[in-house]
Image (cartoon, helix red, strand yellow):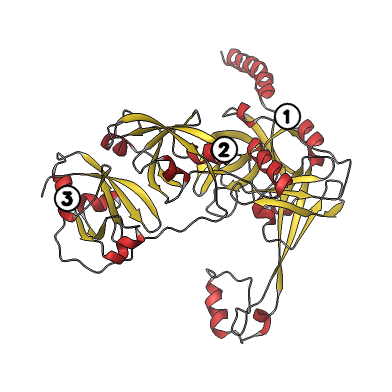
């Protein structure tokens, strides 16, 4: 019996081992062909020392336990007044045989000198053609010809679970290849509004930034840009900029040294189930307009806070993160149709897309106030009407300053210093009117409060319980 079992096991092993091996990719050919297209990038930046009393040990980070010791006991002057240089390493890849190279903006940002080292060990001083920090893409140029160049692929054809590989210089170890799979597509990251990242589990570490992400055909499908890490090293989450996004950026950098993006002048937020219920929506698709900047293309077109953008220029907006990418990719000056949901009714609005300003504009916001002599209302808010100077900062609009929050309002995230502008799209005029609007809501239902917090507006869903 045992002999039979061993024979069956041996047969199954012999049968399955070759088929299993065939499923594992072989990256040897990819590395041999594409390795020469990947470059090592080293940068040097001069940091100017401070004046009297400057930190004499500039390489000790402020969160290091020794920082306070050096700050308190080191002698004045010395190294703190001298200029010193910092160096960093990254990766890149050649996109044209005459020396154009793509990398990350953060690899070469503020660099005084950029040195590109080819796979054949030749070194060139690179010129920075242009940097686009919003997409984290930079275009470099070296004085060389006849260089091996990458083949570009289509990231839209990538499938989750597909094998991909990276070549770069992690920790300065040149021409290192790592492999993994595509973990997700179209990933939105905090503060990164214009890039639908490709998420992978390819091992990416410091020094890999700016290097290429290849599919199994040996085509570049992305630029390795970021990792999620609590330790500073790889933890299984890596993010790459789709190559079509990067190439659009480099085309504009090459042509004019900068990138022009479409702009509406609105602040948006995700639609949660609670907000969808409060607006009477059947689903939570779309981007909720939380605020409209004065004088912006959106205001001129008639967009309002509380509108839900469902389509822009014919492209569906499923989540709020879809909108900045679609608008940003629209040529400034183009007329576009925006399909919205306003107070339960669908509507189309025509807007002339503006150009995204180089720097974010600051919006006026009310100052903090002192304690108010008032009782919490039905949802736990203690409110005070705005003073004339505070209203002036809101361009004359009304609002109620939150002096205190407890109960369901505090649980929803409302906090002291917020300004309530509207309840379910009804503008707030006074505390009495606000309380009447809340009183009319049945217990257990949710209201959407439009809140101004510092320099931005957002909708906050608050559940109305019993009470006043």
**Residue 433 - label:** 3
Of callouts 2 and 1, which one flags the residue occurring earlier in the amino acid sequence?
A: 1
Label 2 neighbour load within 10 Å: few <14, some 14-19, many 20+ = many
- Residue, x 71% and y 41% (percent of image)? 251
Q: Give residue 146's quadrant in the image.
A: top right
- Residue, x 83% and y 48% (percent of image)? 118
Q: Position of residue 331 (x, y in %)?
A: 59, 39
Of callouts 1 and 3, which one flags the residue occurring earlier in the amino acid sequence?
A: 1
On the question of residue 95 being in view, the answer is yes
Of callouts 3 and 2, which one flags the residue occurring earlier in the amino acid sequence?
A: 2
Asked which secondary structure carries label 3, the reply is helix
Q: Which callout, 2 or 1, points to the residue nearer the camera? A: 2
**Pointer 2 and pointer 1: residues touching (CB < 8 Å)?**
no
Q: Residue furthest left?
A: 468
Q: Is residue 183 left or right of residue 399?
A: right
Asked which secondary structure carries label 2, the reply is loop
Q: Is residue 306 left or right of residue 60?
A: left
Query: Residue tagged by mark 2?
Result: 330
Q: How many marks?
A: 3
On the question of residue 175 being in view, the answer is no
**Pointer 1 and pointer 3: residues touching (CB < 8 Å)?**
no
Q: Looking at the image, is 201 positioned above or below residue 431?
A: above
């Amino acid at each position: 019996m045992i002999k039979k079992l061993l024979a069956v096991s041996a047969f199954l092993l012999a049968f399955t081992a070759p088929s299993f091996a065939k499923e594992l990719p072989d990256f040897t050919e990819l590395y041999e062909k594409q390795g020469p297209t990947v470059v090592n990038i080293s940068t040097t930046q001069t940091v100017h020392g401070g004046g009297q009393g400057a930190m004499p040990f500039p390489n000790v980070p402020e969160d290091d336990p020794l920082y306070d010791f050096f700050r308190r006991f080191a002698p004045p002057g010395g190294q703190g007044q001298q200029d010193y240089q910092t160096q960093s390493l990254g990766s890149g890849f050649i996109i044209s045989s005459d020396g154009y190279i793509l990398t990350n903006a953060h690899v070469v940002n503020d660099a005084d000198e950029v040195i590109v080292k080819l796979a054949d060990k030749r070194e060139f001083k690179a010129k920075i053609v242009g940097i686009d920090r919003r997409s984290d893409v930079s275009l470099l140029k070296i004085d060389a010809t006849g260089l091996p160049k990458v083949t570009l692929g289509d990231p839209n054809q990538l499938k989750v679970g597909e094998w991909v590989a990276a070549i770069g210089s992690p920790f300065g170890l040149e021409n290192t290849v790592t492999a993994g799979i595509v973990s997700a597509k179209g990933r939105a990251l905090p503060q990164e509004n214009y890039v639908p990242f490709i998420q992978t589990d390819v091992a990416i570490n410091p020094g890999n930034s700016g290097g290429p992400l290849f599919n199994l055909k040996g085509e570049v499908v992305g630029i390795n840009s970021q990792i999620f890490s609590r330790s500073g090293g790889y933890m299984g989450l890596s993010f790459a900029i789709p190559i079509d996004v990067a190439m659009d950026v480099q085309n504009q950098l090459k042509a004019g040294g900068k990138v022009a993006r479409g702009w509406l002048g609105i602040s948006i937020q995700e639609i949660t189930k609670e907000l969808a219920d409060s607006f009477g929506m059947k689903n939570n698709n779309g981007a909720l307009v939380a605020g409209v900047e004065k004088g912006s293309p959106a205001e001129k077109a008639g967009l309002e806070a509380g509108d839900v953008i469902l389509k822009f220029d014919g492209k569906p907006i499923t989540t709020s993160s879809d909108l900045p990418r679609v608008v940003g990719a629209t040529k400034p000056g183009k007329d576009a149709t925006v399909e919205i949901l306003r107070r339960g009714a669908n509507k189309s609005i025509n807007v002339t897309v503006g150009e995204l300003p180089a720097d974010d504009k600051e919006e006026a916001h009310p100052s903090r106030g002192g304690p108010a002599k008032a009782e919490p209302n039905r949802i736990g808010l203690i409110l005070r009407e705005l003073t004339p100077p505070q209203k002036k900062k809101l361009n004359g609009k009304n609002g109620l300053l939150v002096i205190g929050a407890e109960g369901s309002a505090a649980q929803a995230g409302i906090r002291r210093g917020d300004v309530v502008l509207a309840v379910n799209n009804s503008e707030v005029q006074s505390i009495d009117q606000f309380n009447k609007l809340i009183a009319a809501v049945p217990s257990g239902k949710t209201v959407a409060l439009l809140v101004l917090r510092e320099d931005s507006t957002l909708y906050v869903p608050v559940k109305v319980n019993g009470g006043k």
